[in-house]
Image (cartoon, helix red, strand yellow):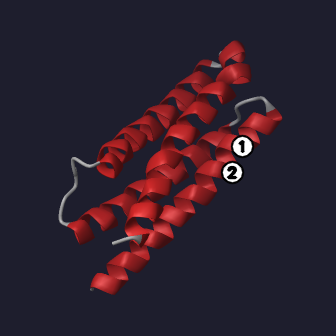
């Protein structure tokens, strides 16, 4: 069970990294938010949530008061807000926001990388 849960956690977190990065950087290079970018944001968020939940099962805690735990929870909240806000911007067809949304996306992606990297670093040393 332990090795299966670890495999699931790692697989989904890597999938989140790939999906979220594709969504964020594709939007950045195209300089215009599109529905398919938003789909990648949602898919990255879902994958990260599944992977993080699996890791939480392994560690025995959902909200650890550690650097990784705090930044991880902030990152998941930001990913959710990011995906919701992208959806709202596209539904409202706000052209100005559609053209400038990538600046917010890059910000969220960089913040999200902090727990991603700290998880790899701290996880590898334990």
The residue beneath circle 2 is: 22
What is the C-alpha distance between the residues marked 1 and 2? 6 Å
Nearest to the observer: residue 71 or residue 14: 71
Residue drawn where x is 26% and y is 49% of the image: 66
What residue sits 47% from the left and 58% below the top?
47
Could you say where residue 76 lies in the image, as x and y percent from the top left? 40, 44
Determine whether 31 is above or below 39 in the image. above
SS type, badge 1? helix
Residue 60 picture quarter: bottom left
Q: Is residue 36 visible?
A: no
Judged left or right of residue 105, residue 52 is left
Q: Nearer the viewer, residue 14 or 70?
A: 70
Vertical comparison of 7 with 14: above or below: below
Mark 2 and mark 1 in contact (Cβ < 8 Å)? Answer: yes
- Identify the residue under disc 1: 25
Q: Which of the 4 quarters of the picture holds residue 77?
A: top left
* Quarter of the picture holding the N terminus: bottom left
Is 61 on the left or on the right of 42, as rendered?
A: left
Q: Which residue is at the far front?
A: 125
How many numbered circles does the render carry? 2
Q: Is residue 89 visible?
A: yes
Residue 126 in the image: state x and y as whole percent: 33, 72
């Amino acid at each position: 069970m332990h090795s299966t849960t670890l495999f699931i956690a790692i697989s989904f977190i890597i999938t989140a990294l790939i999906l979220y990065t594709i969504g964020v950087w594709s939007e950045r290079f195209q300089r215009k938010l599109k529905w398919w970018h938003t789909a990648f944001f949602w898919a990255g968020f879902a994958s990260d949530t599944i992977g993080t939940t699996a890791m939480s099962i392994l560690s025995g805690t959902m909200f650890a008061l550690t650097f990784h735990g705090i930044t991880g929870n902030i990152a998941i909240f930001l990913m959710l807000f990011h995906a919701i806000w992208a959806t709202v911007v596209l539904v409202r067809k706000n052209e100005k926001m559609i053209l400038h949304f990538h600046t917010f996306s890059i910000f969220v992606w960089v913040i999200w990388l902090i727990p991603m990297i700290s998880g790899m670093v701290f996880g590898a040393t334990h």
